[in-house]
Amino acid sequence: MIDINKLLNLLRYDPNDPVLFNSAFFFYFFAVFLMCYLAVHKSKAGRVWVYTLFSLFFFYKACGYYVGLVILSAIVDFNLSKAIHRSKDKSFRKTLLIFSIVLNLGLLFYFKYTNFFIGMINDMTAGHIPLLKLILPIGISFYTFENLSYTIDVYRDEIEPVDNFMDYLFFLSFFPKLMMGPIVRAADFIPQISKPYFIESNDIGKGMYLIISGLFKKIVISDFIYQNFVQYIFDDPSKHTGLECLLGVYGYALVIYCDFSGYSDMALGIARWTGFKIPPNFDSPYQSSSITEFWRRWHISLSSWLRDYLYIPLGGNRKGKVRQYINLGLTMLIGGFWHGASWNFIFWGGMHGSMLAIDKVRIDYLRKKQIKFSGWSGNLLKVLGVLFTFHFVCFCWIFFKASTFHDAWSLIHQIAYDFQPEIWPELYTGYTAVFWVMILGFILHFMPAKAELSLEGFYAKIPVAGSVAVMVAFIWLLVQVKSTQPMIPIYFQF
Amino acid sequence: MPGKNKAAYPFLIIAGSLACLVALSQLNYSFSFKDFQFRKLDMLSDIRTSPVEDKNRPALAGNTGDGRPAAATDSVVKVKDSTGAVTTLPNPDAHHDYMSYTGIMQYAAAQYGEDGAGMHAFLQALADLKAGKRKKVRIAYFGDSMIEGDLITGDLRDSLQLFFGGQGVGFVPITSVVASFRTTITHTFSKDWTDYSYKKDPPANIALGLSGHTFVPSSSSWAKYSPVKKPRLDKFDEVEVLYGPSAGTGITVNDKAYTLAGNDAVNKLDLRLDTGQQGMTIKYASGTQSPLYGVCFESDNGIYVDNYSFRGISGVELGHLSADMVKKMQEERPYDLVVLHYGANVLWKPELTDYSWYERPMTKVMDNLRNDFPGTSFLIIGTADKSYRKGDHYVTAPGVEALLSVQHELAAQHGTAYWNLYAAMGGEGSMVKWVESDTPGANKDYTHFNRLGASKVAALLYKAIMNEYGQKNNIQ
């Protein structure tokens, strides 16, 4: 029997059950949305209104009345940007820009960092300022960055401000990327709003590929490994042997990549099916043979945002070598801090920043001496580079994931001093499925891009009935492996 | 040239898939392949009226339904006292429901006599210690990974020593998988000791120590122990090295040479450490490579709790200990109370409710232990709550109450004390609360306590013991 109360409750925000792409609710939501969207697709205003209203409802389902913050920040930034654009007075423009930055970062800081600083003051002064009961509004980090890039771009005269407020609200609240990114630039997105809703076979194929592979990464690989292995290790590293801890770290490397990129892929796929192209956010990052390359392939929208709106304004590489290294370090430190208010994230950012600076020295040296490796030595160096980069990134993940510094060190201690490789047969018996899924995950990660393209091509060619069959079979498979506990994506908290 | 507009496709794919999935959900099919049970698809589970929850409780054979065994209606048990006269002792089952009572229940069994009933002997020993009539009381606390790294025992020892006196961690094995995790002593060792244990049987001429381990040195083996900066743990005073049969093994302790010689199953080298020294390093030096068990740290009076943790065991393994070794150990290092804390590894199949496979060998183990530790009190700790994921959330495994009834039966049959940790934690669903609270007391495996939770368990156990102690003293 269908319970009407339950049905009505489903439409309300439930703090214990925020909506996720990988929930049954989303399936219904998406179907109803697509129906309404299709009904109005010939009118631009209709598309904008339907998309925006569904997005706001989706956001309400995810974080309740904090949906108001998106609307409020859209109103403020829409008007400030217009005023910046209209004004000819340089200092007035600057004042407005600073006002926008302070306001946006102020909100972000208030929700994300207040308690961190209260804790720090308490630690330093042995004070007892009570922590505030703050809930981090989901997605605030993402839309704050989008607001900032928009206002800054208008200030720099790189883009014209949007005329229509609804267009801007639509851009900011666009539900596929609202909660977990990627960070979308107004300059890329807003021109797409006015285009008719027109999609071709390859959009269908690409969208289908992104949605299915995203769900696969999130549910089959990430959630499975996390729930059945990784969380036990990080919960209490000192109680596990070094071998378990090491495998736990490798597992986590896969978990965080598949979790985040899987969710990003779904966002890209959903956007694609509704006629919007968002640039990819990940490009097989563990294939990188240097840390510089890693950051070109990992969370691309964040790294390029930090480059354009932080590293370059700080001076980039234009103010001498020393300043360049400082700028790199500072950018990564702030990037680390963006991930969360904890020393662990700051340390994580600091490590990456330092390694980027070291890598810059290496690249500059090779360029100056005009040293190039090719042939077998080039291949060998590339393989060694991939291994080194992967292990460095994994080492940093330990700090990213561990709840405290102490936990991180005790995990490292176990790997260094208590390895106990002899327990492998026991371990394998206990976690057989987990280790095979891990191997599968890494194999898929190192597959050439050609394989992806052929799968996309396949999806593009099959008729609707075929797509339905593929989708149903895939969801049935998911239900078989899906952990029954909803797994909140890791990037939800950032 | 752009192709045909396929704007309707996404809607058709999603709506079509949804229709098929809802239709599939209506089919009442379920099938399995080999051991794998395929899950039923249910796209309407969020909006369907929920069926009445199946409690899935085990049927506890022979019980009255409120947790009391059917035979427990007698309010007294007849046993002999030390003079041979028959006396009656109250039967705790007649007063409490063992499944929900959070205190310690003390059983009597005819064959062990009044002195051997429940914790009487141990409580008497505590009273004597407090009154200055004896110098030391010792507890051997056996368990699995729940007490690894001195979890629970460390806090229990601390509370007991604070009240009854004593300084030192008691027994520490030669090597340990969780040495780095133990915060009550700093312990490092060389990797070249051969560790015989329940999991790696020793050759016929070597017996297992009480901890379930025996360590045989190689030519350069060493182990180092240092005190930690905590009250009652910050210096070494009386030290005992426990070892197996040895025909003159040379060792050094802080570079001073000693010879281990003794033919018994357990032998002891007594040392008194200079308190100025910051630790103790024991090294193999010469002669036959004889088995060593561990090192004990005490002062000259007070109470001591020895942590005998062994990862992954159910308690049945204690049957491998030789009677000779246990008896000799009792002479060298007498225990007034033996605690048995198991369960996590018995519950590996959460939905299993028949534990007769465990009860049979465990009964034999209890018979042997009772014989080998004459006059020693026993406390059986019933399993902690263990949850597993069922449907959408974590719930107490049906096996928990079934196992508790077996553990209770073992206690009642063998006239030991019994403490239901599951009830003390809060009963059904308590593990979920411990794991999911703002300051979690247990790990995400919904089985193991973390440091905070272990302290809480120790405090609950200490309180339960002190209640019994207080009651006994009031009676006297």
Image: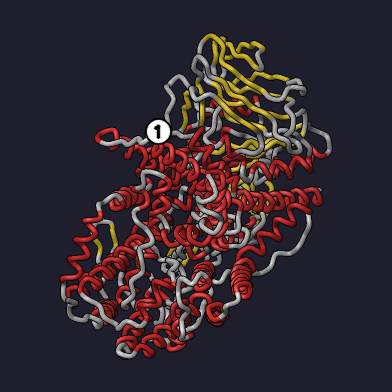
Left or right: residue A71 compared with residue B47: right
Left or right: residue B363 compared with residue A264: right
Depth check: B104 or A339 in front? Answer: A339
Depth check: A416 or A482 in front? Answer: A416
Secondary structure under tag 1 reads helix
**Callout 1: chain:** A
Color theme of the render: secondary structure
Q: Position of residue B93 (x, y in %)?
A: 61, 58
Q: Position of residue B138 (x, y in %)?
A: 69, 35
Left or right: residue A211 compared with residue B319: left
Residue at figure coordinates x 42%, y 28% from the top left: B201
Residue at figure coordinates x 58%, y 36% from the top left: B180
The image quadrant that residue B332 belongs to is: top right
Q: Which residue is mark 1?
A: A422
Q: Position of residue B81 (x, y in %)?
A: 69, 42
Left or right: residue A319 compared with residue A487: right
Residue at figure coordinates x 55%, y 14% from the top left: B246
Q: Residues within 10 Å of mark 1 (few under 14, many from 20)?
A: few
Point out the image quarter for the N terminus of chain B.
bottom left
Amino acid type assigned to the residue bearing label 1 in the image: Glu
Residue occupying the far right of the picture: B131
B235 vs A20: above or below: above
Q: Position of residue B151 (x, y in %)?
A: 61, 44
The image quadrant that residue A97 belongs to is: bottom right
Can see residue B366? yes
Depth check: B322 or B387 in front? Answer: B387
Can see residue A1? no
Numbered-mark total:
1
Residue at figure coordinates x 48%, y 79% from the top left: A161
B94 vs A29: above or below: above
Depth check: A97 or A19 in front? Answer: A97
